[in-house]
Every structure is written in structure tokens, then in C-alpha cells.
Image (tube, helix red, strand yellow):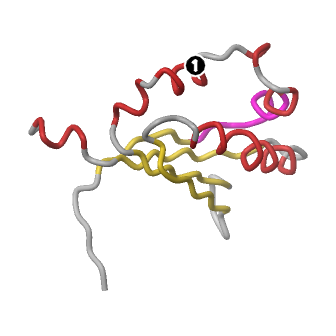
């Protein structure tokens, strides 16, 4: 791959499905804790969440990230390395009652607009 492409922006996609009965806590954690924490990390520029109108997984979060270097930042590494005991009570509850479906990072290869 061309080295100049290494700094292209990245879409980080996380698709999750909370266990039945935990959807309210899941959404509260995402909106009040998780997204604000990630947006404090250097290189994380925006976050969007979607709920399926049909099909699975039930929820996706899409983050716009400046480059793969964002995942190497001290702030992101600190978040990623947390143990269960380091989480808030809400985060502990959500983490133990979710099902991760998809976790992927994408680089733009084509863009079209009308």
C-alpha cells in the first residue's frame, strides 16, 4: 500500500445487540459515557449511532477517525485497557449484557455524490 494512504481517514464501525431487557441501559451508557469518552481521544472526530428498522445487528455506531494512529493514542489505549473493576457501574452492567456482532475499520476507496 502507498505510504501516503496510511493517514487517510478511517470509519470505525461497531455493531452491537444488547441482551433483552438491557436496551435502556445500553443506550444510556452509549450516549452518556461511551461516546463522550471516545470523542475525548485525539483523532476521534465524530460519532453517529443507528438503530435497525429491520434486520440485525440491532445497533451500529460509526466513528469518523483521522487515521489509524488514533488507536495508538495514550487516551484510547487507556480506555481500551480498562478492567471491569475500572468501569462505572453502568458500563459494567452494559458490558456484561451485550453481544458484539461486528467490529471493523474501513478506509475510503470511492466516493460519489448526487
Please name the residue shown 41% across and 49% down the image.
Answer: 11
Magenta extent: 93-101
Q: Quadrant of the N terminus?
A: top left
Is 89 positioned to the left or the right of 16 in the image? Answer: right
Instruction: Return the x and y of residue 25 as percentages of the image width and height.
Output: 86, 44
Q: Residue furthest bottom?
A: 114
Instruction: Return the x and y of residue 76 as percentages of the image width and height.
Output: 52, 27
Q: Nearer the viewer, residue 18 or 54?
A: 18
Q: Nearer the viewer, residue 93 or 53?
A: 93
Q: Residues within 10 Å of mark 1 (few under 14, many from 20)?
A: few
Instruction: Return the x and y of residue 90 as percentages of the image width and height.
Output: 85, 33
Residue on which disc 1 sits:
78
Q: Is residue 52 inside the magenta stretch?
A: no
Is 107 positioned to the left or the right of 26 in the image? Answer: left
Q: Is residue 95 inside the magenta stretch?
A: yes
Q: Residue furthest left?
A: 2
- 91 is higher (above) or lower (below) than 77: below
* Disc 1, SS: helix
Please name the residue shown 23% across and 63% down the image.
Answer: 110
Please name the residue shown 64% across and 37% down the image.
Answer: 37
Instruction: Return the x and y of residue 71 as percentages of the image width and height.
Output: 43, 29
Amino acid at each position: 500500500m502507498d505510504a501516503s494512504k496510511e493517514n487517510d481517514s478511517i470509519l470505525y464501525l461497531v455493531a452491537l445487540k444488547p441482551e433483552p431487557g438491557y436496551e435502556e441501559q445500553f443506550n444510556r451508557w452509549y450516549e452518556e459515557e461511551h461516546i463522550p469518552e471516545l470523542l475525548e481521544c485525539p483523532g476521534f472526530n465524530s460519532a453517529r449511532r443507528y438503530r435497525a428498522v429491520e434486520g440485525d445487528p440491532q445497533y451500529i455506531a460509526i466513528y469518523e477517525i483521522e487515521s489509524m494512529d488514533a488507536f495508538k493514542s495514550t487516551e484510547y489505549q487507556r480506555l481500551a485497557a480498562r478492567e471491569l473493576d475500572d468501569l462505572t457501574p453502568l458500563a459494567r452492567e452494559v458490558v456484561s449484557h451485550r453481544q458484539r456482532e461486528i467490529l471493523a475499520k474501513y478506509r475510503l476507496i470511492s466516493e460519489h455524490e448526487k
